Image (cartoon, rainbow, N blue to C red):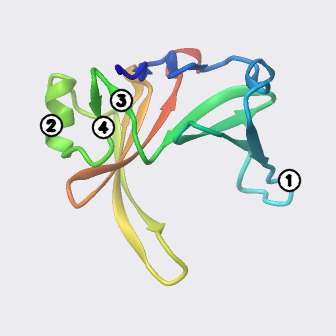
Amino acid sequence: MKKKGLIPNKSYDIFVLGDNISNYLHLPHRIDFYDDDPYICHDTYYFDNFNFEIWVVDSKIDTICCDIECYWQDKNLIKMPYDIFLTMINYQQPDSEDSLYVLTSKHSGQNQKVYDFNNIGLMVWVWRKKIRSILISNYEDE
């Protein structure tokens, strides 16, 4: 069965960037609120049967965070070699890049490279030359 997947700057699967989250609350889900954390300005929604998080700001879908699977052009970007991803986007260079330490457990972490591709609304997190997670946003609305 073909996955619906990513439409850059628009959606992932059935979830549309900018939509009111109430349009999806009929689906089984749980929510994490971060009212006590001044560094996190979104609520996180986890929907059963979907392998990604949805970050919501002011009741609107702001970002979709994929770290298990992220299908685009019938290919899963998660665990894909970064250089293969670059061929998929015609070797477009990122608008910015950074290196961030990401905790992976209580006592260890990884220095991941983070690449921003604003025109396709993707932030790509890479470790050991493979994509580890993707943040999907709508840069056209910013």
Measure the alpha-carbon separation of dots 1 and 2.
Answer: 39 Å
Q: Amino acid at mark 3?
A: Tyr
Q: Residues within 10 Å of mark 3 (few under 14, many from 20)?
A: some
Residue 54 location (% of width, % of height):
63, 37
Q: Are marks 3 and 2 in contact (CB under 8 Å)?
A: no
* Label whose residue precedes the other's in the sequence (1 or 3): 1
Residue at image location 34% in from the left, 46% down from the top: 97
Quarter residue 30 falls in: top right
Q: Amino acid at mark 4?
A: Leu
* Label whose residue precedes the other's in the sequence (1 or 4): 1
Q: Which residue is mark 2?
A: 84
Q: Which residue is mark 3?
A: 71
Label number found at residue 35: 1
- Locate residue 16 relative to residue 70 in the image: left or right: right
- Locate residue 58 relative to residue 110 in the image: left or right: right
Q: Which residue is mark 4?
A: 77
Quarter residue 57 falls in: top right
Q: Amino acid at mark 1?
A: Asp
Residue furthest to the front in view is: 1
- Locate residue 20 relative to residue 134 in the image: left or right: right
Measure the alpha-carbon separation of dots 1 and 4.
Answer: 32 Å
Q: Are marks 4 and 3 in contact (CB under 8 Å)?
A: yes
Task: Label 1, secondary structure: give it.
Answer: loop
* Label whose residue precedes the other's in the sequence (3 or 2): 3
Task: Label 3, secondary structure: give it.
Answer: strand
